């Protein structure tokens, strides 16, 4: 049975990942800053309050993992925030830094501490959550797009660095995912662009060849595959689960 750590695993995409791994028979450990959401997770999941961008928190989680599990088989570095939605000249430096800290430094820290454990056993899988914003430019989303591009660069480097140790690294790029987080993005983009929420939603959907948003479970299923033996030679890959984006910003 595999042992999987999922950051930001108490809700949204992370929760869906945890549910999918658990259903596959894996032991699941989720971290989150939301104590209420963690309390509502199944009792058979290991749960810890932690800020993915705080090194002391991350180090503490891995010490707990060593004590309880004695090792780790897969990491899903999923923690992220949307960041500000604004024209580049209106973005505050502190908002920029916070977005990069959570999305990029959070992935770095989880990978840093997971790698030490995975190297010791000579195998493992690291799955980083990027975004289609890491493949295309997104007007009014400069901090988020920059962070998600950087996550892909981190993954590519990890795959080369860790391959000789039997460790694989890949990045999933979700497109527009149904749920509360995307609703916040839609509201902010509607305000920034002077459009209605429904018009922005329709534009995102029209920007894919399949004409629809994806579900968190679609992302989760890909994560389970990438962490499995079925993907034993899949590494260094950027895999979009987005209904095939053909125009990332059709409103502009």
Image (cartoon, helix red, strand yellow):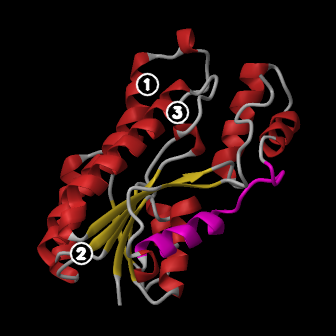
Residue 245 falls in image quadrant:
top right
Which of the numbered marks, if any, corresponds to residue 96?
1
Viewer-proximal residue, 128 or 163?
A: 163
Magenta span includes 21: no
Which label's residue is closer to the chain start, 2 or 1? 1
**Which residue is labeled 3 in the image?**
145
Which of the numbered marks, if any, corresponds to residue 109?
none
Which label's residue is closer to the chain start, 2 or 3? 2
Left or right placement of residue 241 versus residue 104 in this view? right
Whether residue 211 is visible to the viewer of this picture, yes or no, is yes
* Region rendered in magenta: 209-227
**Which residue is labeled 2 in the image?**
123
Left or right placement of residue 81 versus residue 187 in this view? left
Placement of the N terminus among the 4 image quadrants = bottom left
How far apart, in angstroms, are the residues tagged by discs 2 and 1? 35 Å
Q: What crowding class fits label 3: few (fewer than 14 Cα within 10 Å), some (14-19), or many (20 or more)?
A: many
Q: What crowding class fits label 2: few (fewer than 14 Cα within 10 Å), some (14-19), or many (20 or more)?
A: many
Q: Please, which residue is most extreme toward the left here?
A: 120
Total tally of numbered discs in the picture: 3
Residue 95 falls in image quadrant:
top left
Up/down of 213 relative to 218, above or below: above
What x and y, as percent, mark residue 27? 38, 84
Which residue does the image show at 55% across and 28% down from the upper left? Answer: 84
Residue 46 falls in image quadrant:
bottom left
What x and y, as percent, mark residue 132? 59, 44
How far apart, in angstroms, are the residues tagged by discs 1 and 3? 11 Å
What x and y, as percent, mark residue 111? 27, 56
């Amino acid at each position: 049975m595999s042992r999987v750590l999922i950051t930001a695993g108490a809700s949204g995409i992370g929760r869906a990942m945890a549910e999918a791994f658990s259903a596959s028979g894996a032991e699941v450990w989720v971290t989150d800053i939301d104590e209420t959401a963690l309390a509502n997770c199944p009792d058979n999941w290991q749960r810890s309050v932690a800020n993915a961008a705080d090194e002391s928190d991350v180090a503490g989680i891995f010490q707990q993992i060593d004590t309880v599990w004695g090792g780790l088989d897969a990491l899903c570095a999923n923690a992220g925030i949307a960041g500000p939605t604004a024209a580049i000249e209106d973005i505050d430096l502190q908002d920029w830094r916070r977005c990069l800290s959570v999305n990029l430094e959070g992935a770095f820290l989880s990978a840093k501490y997971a790698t030490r454990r995975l190297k010791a056993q000579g195998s493992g899988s690291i799955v980083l959550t990027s975004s289609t914003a890491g493949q295309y430019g997104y007007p009014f989303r400069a901090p988020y797009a920059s962070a998600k591009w950087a996550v892909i660069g981190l993954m590519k480097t990890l795959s080369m660095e860790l391959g000789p140790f039997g460790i694989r690294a890949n990045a999933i790029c979700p497109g527009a995912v149904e749920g509360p987080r995307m609703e916040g993005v839609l509201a902010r983009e509607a305000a920034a662009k002077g459009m209605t929420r429904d018009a922005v939603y329709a534009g995102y959907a029209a920007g894919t060849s399949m004409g629809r948003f994806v579900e968190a479970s679609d992302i989760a299923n890909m994560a389970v595959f990438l962490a499995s033996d079925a993907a034993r030679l899949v590494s260094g890959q950027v895999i979009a689960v987005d209904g095939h984006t053909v125009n990332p910003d059709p409103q502009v």
